[in-house]
Image (cartoon, rainbow, N blue to C red):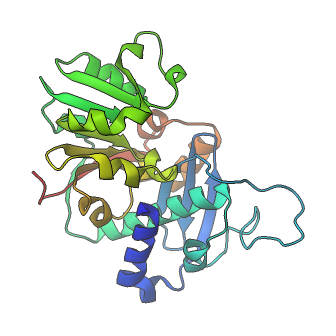
Amino acid sequence: MILQESIDFILKQNGNRIENYSVDHVFIGALFTAVQLSSGYCGLAKTEFTGTLHHGHRSNPMQFEPGMYAGSNLIKLLQASESNGFLNVVQLAAINALSAEWISKGKYNIIENADPLDLIATQGKKIAMVGAFCSYIKKLSQQNCHLQVLELNEQAFDEESKTFYVPAEKSAEVFKQSEIAIITGSAIANNTMDQLLSEIPAHVKIIVVGPSGGVIPEVLFDKNVSIIGATRVINNKKLFQMIAEGASGYHLFQCGAAQKICILNELSK
């Protein structure tokens, strides 16, 4: 899985340097989860739970339960394999915090304050998108392109957007007909990203977008991803306040808590 590959990558590259890193703060909001590390870097992930959640008293308490995240050793958090949804989303936010530091010190081609749709030609293109990403549907629907949106739940669309709906089980068929594939980073959070990427033919330009997609770029680039539309946290304190109040990505950008960045795969077509 991409999350595990990201963890393995950072431990191999920086295991000795980060062995004393700890988790300073964890905020699990309705829409986003944020983790701030002792390094000061902060990472985001969509609050999307897989597996079981915490359920009251346990005869065999888990290593990570509410009240145990803050102050914990980062490597122990990343290597924990307990099956609970809280841990999974916190791990993703933590690896995105590590990735933020890795990206800041790397030699990546980064365009700040830009969205991937600003960087690609969509006119006349066949575009497959995974997930009812409302702002993208609205923008692409106004362009001369053929858009198909793969989604598990048709009710995620408003009436105007339902014309773009395609059942998620038709993903492989839709990808074969496409020139551009857009996948939201939440596919990493719900553990469907690997399967989706494996279905996309080599000729298709792949874009991963959203806060959850801010993992180690090399992991996604190795899977033929051309552009990562990530989120850089620039004001931790403001971010935590906004997440606690149910902020969406739009609110985080508007208030100056975060900014959009695009990381380009220079080896991609």
* Horizontal and vertical percent position of residue 106: 25, 70
What residue do we see at 44% from left, 30% from top? 151
What residue do we see at 63% from left, 45% from top? 29
* Horizontal and vertical percent position of residue 159: 46, 10
**Compared with residue 35, is residue 24 higher up or lower down, i.e. above or below?**
below
Left or right: residue 241 compared with residue 202:
right
The number of discs equals: 0
Depth check: give the residue in front, 139 or 168: 168
* Horizontal and vertical percent position of residue 180: 20, 37
What residue do we see at 37% from left, 75% from top? 9
Q: Is residue 257 visible?
A: no
Left or right: residue 261 compared with residue 250:
left
Where residue 5 sits, quadrant-wise, is bottom left
Left or right: residue 205 compared with residue 156:
left
Left or right: residue 89 compared with residue 174:
right
Farthest-out residue, bottom? 16
Where residue 104 sits, quadrant-wise, is bottom left
* Horizontal and vertical percent position of residue 225: 24, 53
Q: Is residue 194 visible?
A: yes
**Compared with residue 211, is residue 158 higher up or lower down, i.e. above or below?**
above
Depth check: give the residue in front, 30 or 51: 51
Farthest-out residue, top? 159
**Compared with residue 162, is residue 117 higher up or lower down, i.e. above or below?**
below
**Compared with residue 80, is residue 223 higher up or lower down, i.e. above or below?**
above
Q: Where does the N terminus fall, quadrant-wise?
A: bottom left
What residue do we see at 42% from left, 35% from top? 169
